[in-house]
Amino acid sequence: MTSTGTRPSGERKQVLQKRIRLIVAVTIAYNLIEAIVAIGAGMAASSGALIGFGLDSTIEVLSAAAVAWQFTRTDPERWEKGTLRIIALAFFALAAYVATNSVLSLTGMLEAEHSTVGIVLTALSVVIMPFLSLAERRTGRELGSATAVADSKQTLICTYLSATVLIGLLLNSLFGWWWADPLAALVIVGFALREGIEAWKGDACATSVGMLLEDDPHPLPDQRRHR
């Protein structure tokens, strides 16, 4: 939203919608490349963590693609609820993947082996993805779009996941601590489930972002009503 508390003008609204389309296009392109590289590196190193990380990137592509489709419509607001449901399902799929991968790792059925390519890839994701998340979140908040904000949270959670995979790969390579990655990743499951439930209910703006940005001076309409 704008600093005056009113919705953006028609011209500004079009600019913001174009910006969101650009951001999600970059997100989709990056995650497609990330998925291909991660799955390839994971197969080469027999690393379940990296293969799973690549599959997670495909989930992020689904979420971003849903938002991209919404903002190609002449009336994006009309498709807000349906798109939020798709994003919620992406969160649930992400939680299921992380939980399954973590349990398999902890029981010794999967092991995150050393992979230089995997370490470099996850390190790049930790640097790049927060900027994409922040740009989409700010644009979505100014536009008043719950789907853009929810998708930015999906990207942010994938950043956390990238960090846990990176830490797991490093600790395993340096110290042989194979259990570090699955334990850290299990924390992500709780966040993903919470965000999925809130997106399904349509609370992605009012609750999720509000919890992270309590001091934001430009709350969305739903946040102001709840205060």
Image (cartoon, grey):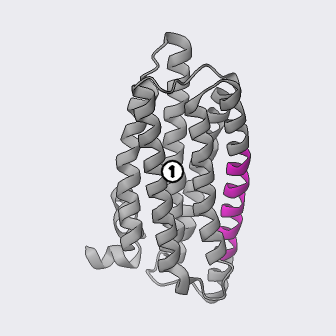
Q: Residue drawn 60% across and 27% down? A: 47
Q: Amino acid at mark 1?
A: Leu
Describe residue 84's horizontal placement relative to residue 41 as left or right.
left
Please identify the quadrant where the C terminus is shown: bottom left
Q: Position of residue 4 (x, y in %)?
A: 46, 80
Residue 201 found in image quarter: bottom left
Q: Residue drawn 46% across and 57% down? A: 91
Highlighted range, magenta: 17-33
Residue 169 found in image quarter: top right
The secondary element bearing badge 1 is classed as helix
In the image, is residue 114 above or below residue 56?
Answer: above
Q: Residue drawn 57% across and 68% down? A: 139
Q: Position of residue 90 (x, y in %)?
A: 51, 59
In the image, is residue 101 above or below residue 67?
Answer: above
Observer-nearest of 32 and 111: 111
Q: Is residue 132 visible?
A: no
Q: Position of residue 34 (x, y in %)?
A: 69, 43
Q: Which residue is mark 1?
A: 156
